[in-house]
Image (cartoon, rainbow, N blue to C red):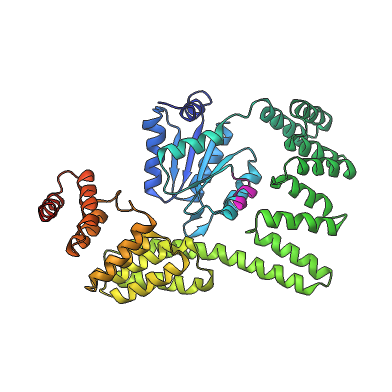
Amino acid sequence: MAGKYDSIVYDYFEKSNGSVVLISEDMIFKKTLATTILKVLGIKRNCFFAFENIRQGLKKIQELEKKSVETVVFIERILAGYPSTDTIITLKRLLPELKIVVLAGETKRENIAYFYELGVNNVISKPASINNIIEKMAFTVQPQGKLSEYMSIGKRCMAAGKLMDAMQIADKILRLKPESPAGLMLKGDIFSLQGDLTKALDCYHRAHDSSKLYLEPIKKLVGAYREVDADKALVYMKKLDKLSPLNAERKTDIGKIYVHRKEMDMAEKYFDQALDAATQEAMSLISSVAENISEAVEQTSPRMAEKYLSRVLEAKGKRLGPGDITLFNKLGIALRGQGKWKEAIENYTQALRISPDDEGLHYNMGLAYIDGGERRLAGKCFENALKRNPVFYKDSEAVSMNVGTLFSELREYEKAIPCFQSAIEINPNNAAAHRKLAAMEDSL
């Protein structure tokens, strides 16, 4: 075992007796996470619990909580075809100290901001390597020293109604780290509970000034101003919206304020954005479902895979973006599987308008041209892929062979030779690559 991250995670299991609960239908990630904990880190005790069902996972989390076992929950963004947003919100409301890591297929800045706003501790983009999992877990479980300890004590005191004790803790935090946003927010919450809104607002403003991009102080300001100054509440709601633009509920609330002001144009603008954000969430769900269907039928029924992937791409319309390239690639494979090489090329052409520098799209379009016997056009596609990434074929024996074979047939040997050499590096027993390489070397 090597590296500081390994040591942090190892100590979490061995010294803190920590556990992991995984709620996911992804068997590959389950196997990777199990390998990380049980084999790479060498943890021998029973500390890893995996469930495909939300209810069973929640039951286990509650069981561990009753035993005061420190737990990290890994949960899919999409579960059983639905976003897990409500489950995450419920968990953080009932167990504020619970550590949650979201598993997602894509992690755009907007998505990450929204996850953190829900109270998530970390986000892992799949597919994930063992090193990536260990690093993310280390950042999730690593103790934050005295500051973190004092914050936990202060929150417990406040929850128990011991406001004077909580205030002493807040002052300790601010002595330890002057203008700490966490310490200032704790102090602001205490003043708020004491009914001193002026002092509470002062603390929240200082917390915001200390960390402009931190969402929590802005949320505190929105909450404090909501009942006393709608204009100022709106200012901070719009700041939050800029930092975390996928929150449809907040956009709706902003729209309602403009309705109350009789500014209907602005209200309509935010209501439209709210629907767009909700639609975006729904579309990511639809995409996930379509991908699952296509993976289930791609070998046995390319026609069915084409049907569902086409429906999703059509439904997305103008909302198509770089994150949808996987859908285009899957649809292209489904079309080629039915001999529809011309339709596959049209599909890749549409995808390239969205992501013109994606070498995978250029390569796949080349394969479609090969299906249609258009070798010269296929060669141009492969050349376009090589311009974007001169070594794109190096990680795959099959891709190396496909590119090498086409260029050798076109008598472009200087382009073919590195591809066959790559295939041999991956698989030294590749007889076809050895044979074709020898034939070209003889010709040269």
Where 440 sits versus 300, above or below?
above
Residue drawn at the location 24% of the way across and 48% of the way down: 422
Residue 329 x/y as whole percent: 37, 64
Evaluate whether residue 341 shows in this view: yes
The verdict on residue 277 being magenta is no
Residue 355 x/y as whole percent: 45, 64
Where 195 sits versus 259, above or below?
above
Residue 283 x/y as whole percent: 52, 65
Between residue 368 and residue 19, name the one nearer to us: 368
Magenta range is: 113-120
Q: Quadrant of the N terminus?
A: top left
The verdict on residue 118 being magenta is yes
Residue drawn at the location 46% of the way across and 35% of the way down: 134
Between residue 318 and residue 48, name the one nearer to us: 318
Q: Quadrant of the C terminus?
A: bottom left
Residue drawn at the location 51% of the way across and 23% of the way down: 15
Residue drawn at the location 77% of the way across and 39% of the way down: 185
From the image, give the main secondary structure of the stretch colored magenta: helix
Where 436 sits versus 173, above or below?
below
In the image, 257: left or right of 377? right
Q: Residue furthest front?
A: 444
